[in-house]
Amino acid sequence: MITFERVSKRYDEGHDALRDVSVTIGRDELVFLTGHSGAGKSTLLRLIMLMDRPTRGRVLVDGRDLASVKPRGVPRHRRGIGVVFQNHRLLDDRTVYDNVALPLVIAGCEHREVGRRVRAALDKVGLLDRERAMPVTLSGGEQQRVGIARAVVGKPQVLLADEPTGNLDPALSAEIMQLFEEFNQVGVTVLIASHDLVLISRLHHRIITLRNGRLVGGSSS
């Protein structure tokens, strides 16, 4: 589903964020991405989202070389990828419903379909009864659940998460990871960047490790 073929990324100031990385993440697989701060985890995710382009090598998603995606095709590419951030990135002046609905509204979905999908996503993360709440009234764990609902409301094939439990206590972190496993079980390919080695080691999924931009473990699917 996601393939990196000898990918390197050098930024303008000369920093090598990724160095000759080759790895494949299979369709319907859940994989953890770990490594020290600055190891290249966020860069790897940015390349999948086409927020950056590789300096060398190829990135393929669902068999398509992302080098073939022109700027006007980037929004369409991103519609097939759900993204969960550590800091939620919710709009504080919008309700939970409106935050989750935003990707569908941008994509031009019909009003009735928006309502159906938003409520299904909120139900999946256990927040259907909070659809009219404002984000400021939610706990940190609930805000992260809203972020997950927004990421999956468009029914993406791929779900990326960048340190999704970084601001949560261990019990809430375990609940959030269980949600990712549930989405994976219904056919979503999931890649999670995380520092929480204690938690992810208990979940028994493949772990990809980066060190100074190089892959040092977990390349086999």
Image (cartoon, rainbow, N blue to C red):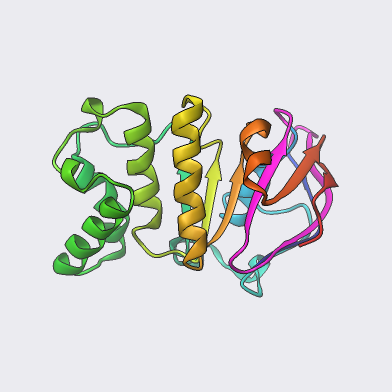
Q: Dividing the image into 4 quarters, which one contains the C terminus?
A: bottom right
Q: Magenta stretch: residue 30 in it?
A: yes
**In the rendered image, is residue 17 in sight?**
no
Tally the marks. 0
Percent of width and height locating residue 156: 45, 64
Quarter occupied by residue 42: top right
- Identify the residue shown where x is 72% and y is 30%: 38
Q: Dividing the image into 4 quarters, which one contains the N terminus?
A: bottom right
- Identify the residue shown where x is 24% and y is 57%: 118
Percent of width and height locating residue 188: 51, 64
Q: Magenta stretch: residue 15 in it?
A: yes
Q: Is residue 110 left or right of residue 1?
A: left
Q: Magenta span covers which residues?
A: 12-38
**In the rendered image, is residue 21 in sight?**
yes
Q: Is residue 152 above or below residue 72?
A: above
Percent of width and height locating residue 7: 79, 55
Tell which of 187 and 61 is nearer to you.
187
Q: Is residue 181 left or right of residue 155?
A: right
Q: Is residue 138 left or right of residue 71?
A: left
Tell which of 161 and 109 is nearer to you.
161
- Identify the residue shown where x is 64% and y is 66%: 66
- Identify the residue shown where x is 72% and y is 47%: 207
